[in-house]
Image: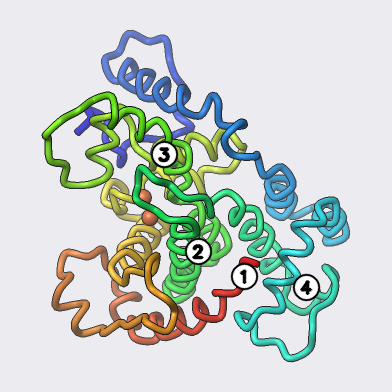
Amino acid sequence: MDSISASTFSPTTTPTLSHNKNSHRIEKVMNVEKKYIADVDRLIPRPDIALEVLCLAQDSSSSVAELAKKIEHDPNMTANMLRMANSSYFGHMQEITSLKDIIVRLGLDMVKILAITSASAGILTSPQQAYDLEPRALWNHSHACAVLAEIIARYANLDNHYTIYTAALLHDIGKVVLNKPLLSACAAKKTDKKFSSILELERFMLQTDHARVGAALLAAWGLPESITIPVARHHSGGGIKPNRLDVKIISLANFLVESIGIRSLMPEDFHFDVDEFLRQNQESPDFSSFSANMASIMEEFFTRFTGADLILA
Ligand SMILES: [Fe+2]
Ligand SMILES: [Fe+2]
C-alpha cells in the first residue's frame, strides 16, 4: 500500500515546494497521476459540451434557454437525450420530441442527468482488456452504480442527488485511462505475486490506481470536489471523514452492483435477496437509512435499471 492511501488523496491538493516530508509525498503522487492524464485528450474525447452544460447547470444565474442552446450545439447529445427521455425508464406515454419538452416535462435536474449520461456513454462503452471488461461492461456497471446511488441518496435525504449520480457514473473513468498502461506494465513486469484487489495490482504496476487517476482527470476537466472526492475515495469508504455520506453512498452502490454481477447479467436474470445479502455481506458499507429501506431501494433500482437498458442505441 502506498504511503498516501486513496482515502487521503485529494486531486485538487496544490503541490508545494515546502521540504516537509508529507508535501514531498503529495507532490510525487500528483506527478504520477499527471503523467497518466497528460495524453488523455488523444484517448478520451473531452466531453466539452457536457462539461459546459454541467457548469451552466450548476450556476444558479444561468437560464434554461441558455442551457438548451448549449445542448442543441451538439446534435448527437440532443438525439441521445431524446432517446433516453422516451425509454421505458421514464414511463411516459406521450412521446417527447424536443429538448424543450424534456425540460418542461422532466425538469431541469433530469436535463443535467441526461446530458452527463449521454456524454459518459461514449467514453465508457469501449472494452477495457486490462480489467477483463468486455464492450459495454464498464458502462453497465457505471450506469447501474449511478442509478442506485441516486436512489440511496434520496432515501438518505441528501439534496444533491444529481451530483452523486454524476460522481457514481464517472467513478471508474480512471480505468479507461489506465487500461493501456496497465496492459503494458503487466506484460513488461512479470511477477508471481498474488494481488488481493485490482487496486493493489494497479499500485504495484503503475504506482497509482484508477480512483486517483479518475479523480485527477475530472479535476483537470474542471469538475468540482463534490464529484472528484467521491471518485478518489470510492474504494476506501467514507471512513476518513465520517460525515461524507456521498462517499459512503457511492462505495455502497459500487459494492452492491459488483455483488449482484450486473456487468455480465441480462436484466431479466437479476436477483437480489435482502436477507441473504445481509447474511453474506456483514462487512459491507452501511448506514441506517439504507438498511432500513433496503428492500424498497433495491426494488426501485431493478425497475429503473431494467427500463434504462435501451438507453444506448
Ligand atoms: Fe473502482
Ligand atoms: Fe466500480
Residue 78, position in %: x, y?
Answer: 78, 61
- The answer to whether 299 is drawn above or below residue 16 in the figure is below
| Marks 4 and 1, how far apart at CA | 15 Å
Looking at marks 1 and 3 on the same chain, the residue that comes earlier in the sequence is marked by: 3
* Circle on res. 311: 1
Residue 101, position in %: x, y?
Answer: 83, 75
Residue type, label 3: Asn
Q: How many marks?
A: 4
Q: Nearer the viewer, mark 3 or mark 2?
A: 3
| Marks 2 and 4, how far apart at CA | 20 Å
| Marks 1 and 3, how far apart at CA | 25 Å
Which residue carries the number 3 mark?
179
CB under 8 Å between discs 1 and 2: yes
| Marks 3 and 2, how far apart at CA | 19 Å
Locate the C terminus and report the quarter of the image it occupies.
Answer: bottom right
Q: Is mark 4 within 8 Å of ligand 2?
A: no
- The answer to whether 130 is drawn above or below residue 75 in the figure is above
Q: Which of 219 and 267 lies nearest the eye of the viewer?
A: 267
Residue type, label 2: His
Q: Which element carries disc 1, helix, strand or loop?
A: loop
Q: Which element carries disc 3, helix, strand or loop?
A: helix
Classify residue 288 by image quadrant.
bottom left
Looking at marks 3 and 2 on the same chain, the residue that comes earlier in the sequence is marked by: 2
Which residue carries the number 4 mark?
102
Q: Nearer the viewer, mark 2 or mark 4?
A: 2
* Circle on res. 143: 2
> In the figure, is residue 286 to the left or right of 304?
left
Looking at marks 4 and 1 on the same chain, the residue that comes earlier in the sequence is marked by: 4
Question: Residue at point 47% right, 64% down?
Answer: 140
